[in-house]
Image (cartoon, rainbow, N blue to C red):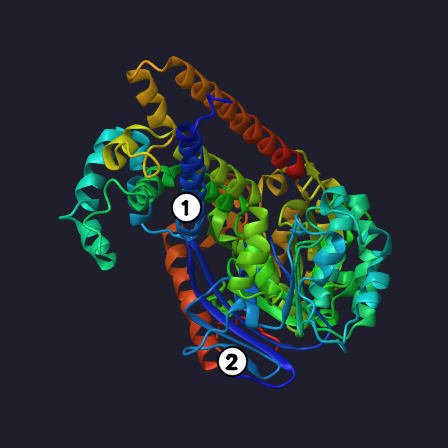
Amino acid sequence: MRMAEPGRINAAFRGRLGHFVLDAELSLPATGVTAIFGASGCGKTTVARCIAGLEHMTDGFCAVDGEVWQDHHSFRPVHRRPIGYVFQEASLFQHLSVRRNLSFGAPKAAGAQIAFDEVVELLGLAALLDRSPYRLSGGERQRVAIGRALLSQPKLLLMDEPLAALDHTTRNEILPFLERVHERLSLPVFYISHDMSEIERFADHLVLMERGRVVEAGPLRSLGSALRPAADRDRYGDCSDRQNSVGKPLRMTAMPIDFHDIDPNRVAAILYRPQDDVDGLLAAFAQDLARFGERIGGVVQRNIKDGSGCQVGMQAVDLMTGREISICQPLGSGAMACKLDAAGLAEAAVAVTRAIAADVDLVVINKFSKQEAAGEGLRDELADAIASGIPVLTAVPEKCLDAWNDFTGGIGTSLLCERGAIDGWWQDLSSRIKRARAARLPADAPAALLADHHVG
Amino acid sequence: MEIWSAEIRQSVLLTIELAAISTAILLVLATPLAWWLAHAKGWWTEIIASVIALPLVLPPTVLGFYLLVLLGPDGPGGWIARLWGERTLAFTFEGLVIGSVVYSMPFVVQPIRNAFTAIGERPLEVAATLRASPTRTFWTVAVPLARPGFLTGAVLGFAHTVGEFGLVLMIGGNIPDRTKVLSVAIFDYVETSRWREASMLAGLMVVFAFAVILTMTLVDKRAARAAA
């Protein structure tokens, strides 16, 4: 959306920095706090630097509140953009006292909107004013840096992980100050973070980035619930039955599978390679279908990642009720202590039985691995489904193919996707998404669901 | 004191004058050069840097020879000298200043360039986000932060100008009150067996060298302490 709109921040940057490819487009209200969230290296900082003008993408557009800062013909240099920028490290001017750091960017003329005394009071800087930056703690430095940015009277404040370089205690000491800033000053803020707990504390809007692209954007309330399971739980999670619903899925995506073609007399499996994340795709897809009222039952498992994208556990969701039925936790270096453990597997079996009883059109178990093959729980239920003429769809990692064949020997199986076919499938998928995005129209193929519900 | 003769006084004053003027010119020329070298990214950057560093390796007589040709009546120096009615820049004080500037340039450019590089991009970016124009950023952020580099550069430039000998002899000769600086004077006294004068000047130079090294060490120490 390369046009300047009053009251909004419009930005689009496309290009390459070294090996990193950025292709991000944003249109957000120029009010409140917008959090840019994503794993390290997803391009959050690059987007902020592009908006600030610190990075110059030739194929870029940036307009804030109707004022064009960058387009094809013009590029406003950093020092002419009314921004405040708080870097990850405080980066105070070491040759100046705290007071002179604070007033470095402050306009000489009186009558500034954000007054010196107000900022000093807001951030608790009174006792530090005549000190040298060398004599400050990390938290104090970052408060001075925030105050310095505010006093330059910005129209947009960009904060690039301002707490990431601080330890836990210091972070908790600064957070209240940040909240006060956001409450007292009606200043649009871009807050970059990979920590969901920070974001939930004061963000109004959320932009989710992945590999240089914006994958989702919108008010935190509508997006937050989908992210919350990952954010709420601490690193080790728990195994209790959770009542929260699955919430809005992050992504729906197109799959060239016609469900009517799935053989009801066999368990259909998509064979995939680890890097292809087919199980994640199938989970999102099945949850969408169930949520939109399709008669789908079964159980999906998905990885729970922490803010920085590390896998910290696994969650299984009953498709019919939308409830989590088990949570598993990691056992050091990425190994799962239990995936679907005995209890979990039993619960999965119950979910499948319930689905058969409800006479669903399709049973989905998004991931099959050796743990499932080891347990006996699920086999009978799958056989029951086949016997009732309900097709079963699952995804099987390549390395589990033998276990899968053993497991389904008596039931019968059909592989929907041989390993060679997956390449073509992904290419087809990505071109579909591109086309859908370009046309902003629903994808055409009958079996494919529309990719990518962008908000805003 | 008899030994503090007019001749010696002349040499000392001439040396200080030459070193002061050269250092001032060096700082003016080296600062933008060092800034450019610290920030330019092209392949030619290091070629220019190597050209500037040549006097570190070249024998002063070689440098002196080329400068003599350039400053002489048939070189560009001669053409310039004609503007004020002289024949040549060789064997003049102005010629010595030019020679000293060329000779001492690497000793001034290098510390300042290192200091600018050590600052990094971040303070400059911060200044830009605080609405400081590139000029203001340069004067209020880059130069103050690079101060130790400037001090080192100035001290080294001054000291090397005071101590140069081969080059001065080649392009300046030994003309009292015009080109007879300390190092040449010492050589002259030794040649004419005036040991007392020679040893006094030599002693003076030892004290001076010691003071320079001590100053540099203290400056370095202070910079390190400030950065801690």
Q: Residue at x 46, y 23 (%)?
A: B205
Place of residue A247 in the rendered image (x, y in percent of width and height, measured from the top left) = 72, 66
Place of residue B141 in the rendered image (x, y in percent of width and height, measured from the top left) = 58, 54
Q: Nearer the viewer, residue B96 or B65?
A: B96
Q: Which residue is at the far left?
A: B74
Amino acid type indicated by mark 2: Met
Is any part of residue A228 visible from this angle?
Answer: no
Res A360 → quadrant = bottom right
**A260 horizontally vs A184: left or right:** left
Place of residue A338 in the rendered image (x, y in percent of width and height, measured from the top left) = 69, 39
Discs 1 and 2 lie in a common subunit: no
Badge 1 crowding class, 10 Å Cα cut-off, few under 14, some 14 to 19, many 20 or more, is many
Residue linked to disc 2: A1
Mark 1 secondary-structure assignment: helix
Q: Which mark is residue A146?
A: none
Place of residue B76 in the rendered image (x, y in percent of width and height, measured from the top left) = 19, 52
Q: Which residue is at the far front?
A: B2
Q: Residue at x 46, y 73 (%)?
A: A75
Q: A169 above or below A285?
A: above
Label 1 resides on the chain identified as B
Amino acid type indicated by mark 1: Leu
Q: Nearer the viewer, residue A365 or A205?
A: A205
Q: Quadrant of the C terminus of chain A?
A: bottom right
Q: Residue at x 54, y 49 (%)?
A: A411
User: Rounded to the nearest whole Å, what is the CA distance between mark 1 and mark 2?
Assistant: 53 Å
Residue linked to disc 1: B26
Is any part of residue A20 visible from this angle?
Answer: yes
Label 2 resides on the chain identified as A
Count of numbered circles in the view: 2
**A363 horizontally vs A55: left or right:** right
Mark 2 secondary-structure assignment: loop
**A323 horizontally vs A88: left or right:** right
